[in-house]
Amino acid sequence: MLGTRGVPSVYGGFETCAEQLGVRLVERGHEVTVYSRPHFVDPNLKQHRGIRLVSIPTVRNKYLDTLVHVFLSSLHALGRRYDVCLYFIAGNSVVAWIPRLVGTRTVINVDGLDWRRAKWPGPAKRYLQAAERLAPRLANAALTDSRFVQRFYAECYGARIAYIAYGSDVEPVPPGAALEKWELEPRGYILFVGRLVPENHPDHLLDAFRSLADTRGMKLVLMGDASYADDYVRRVKGYAAEDVVFTGYVYGEGYRELASNAYAFVLTSSASGTHPALLEAMGMGNCVVVNDTPENLEAMGGAGLSYRGGEGAASLAPVLEMLLERPDVVEAYRHRAREHVRRHYSWDAITEQYLALFHRVLSGRKRKQRR
């Protein structure tokens, strides 16, 4: 697997997917290698839960970090002659042809439409659009975890790509050290999880929360930070108050504890693709509220509430006010969210779908070899 920061998964959705998928592939008797970056994963760590780790150096730069790492990883993979190389992120498609030189089949998870993110300047957006268009051509197969993105590829590029959902097998964690650390009460806070960047719109939630006439003693918790958006982070953190808590990044048990005990979870992001934190929050039994992008509504599947993202806090505030007044509604949506994830987002089922896709691209190689 190439294009992530590596495993153990301590950063985001791609890393979680690599770990969850990799562990299950190992359990099914397959050999799995994940390429990692030394500034995210200890380069001395050679194995994790049966997954082989290969640390490849890169350039620590906002625009070059990923691409340099995946290019060097692809050169390394060239000599290994893997059966299948699974790439993550459409921007990495430009090197997905390299392992194919020795007969390795390549598959790329294009994720969402990354060029829409506000963080990218004009030249980077154009590169990402070109890489996105090339993804189904330079790899043997492409997939996404969003039906919306799948339709976009069909309508805009005339390309048929596969759909495989993101998984969310998570168990709720009871109140403990994390709540104590940040002086929080179970069901006593509204939670945001994500990077504090413009396309995630934490300001929607901060403005909406601040506009409420009565928060009923509820706190607002923002779990996340940003590596390359210092000015925006400083502006967002200017909202700090006694009832607003900035935790920074929290991982592992602490993350699951905070996500398990919130009153409600709010996803304000307008960036495309399926948001892992949303599915995990639903799997842990949260009442969720999302920005009404097609991708967010698709993932939520009617098991939560939405607000009009174009109107920002003006649309979100009445939703929050209603939830604070109606704990019975909150409880009903918690049940719906758990059931929705249980039915549609099992990592075991998703692993089988990846395996089926791998077998299809490998059967194409075998037919070609027999000719």
Image: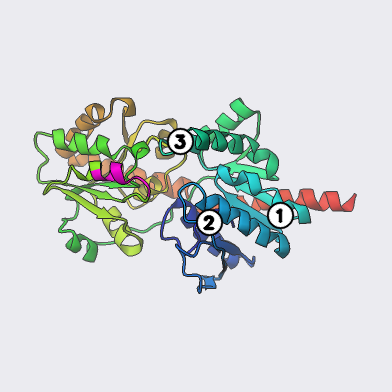
Q: For label 3, count other residues whose C-alpha is less than 10 Å away and answer few (under 14), some (14-19) or many (20+).
A: few
Q: Which residues are magenta?
A: 228-234
Q: Residue 301, image x and y in percent?
A: 41, 37
- Secondary structure beneath disc 3? loop
Q: Residue 239 sits in which quadrant?
A: top left
Quick one: 283 or 77, which is closer to the camera? 77
Q: Which residue is mark 3?
A: 121
Measure the alpha-carbon separation of dots 3 and 1: 30 Å
232 in magenta = yes
Measure the alpha-carbon separation of dots 3 and 2: 38 Å
- Number of numbered discs on residues: 3
Numbered circle sitting on residue 15? none
Q: Which residue is mark 1?
A: 99
Q: Tell which tag, 1 or 2, sits nearer the viewer.
A: 1
Q: Which residue type carries mark 3? A: Pro
Q: Which residue is mark 2?
A: 348
Horizontal relation, residue 42 to residue 309: left or right: right
Measure the alpha-carbon separation of dots 1 and 2: 27 Å
On-image quarter of the N terminus: bottom right
**258 vs 210: above or below:** below
Q: Residue 347, image x and y in percent?
A: 50, 54
Measuring 36% from the left and 30% from the top, which residue is drawn there?
292
- Secondary structure beneath disc 2? helix
Q: Which residue type carries mark 1? A: Pro
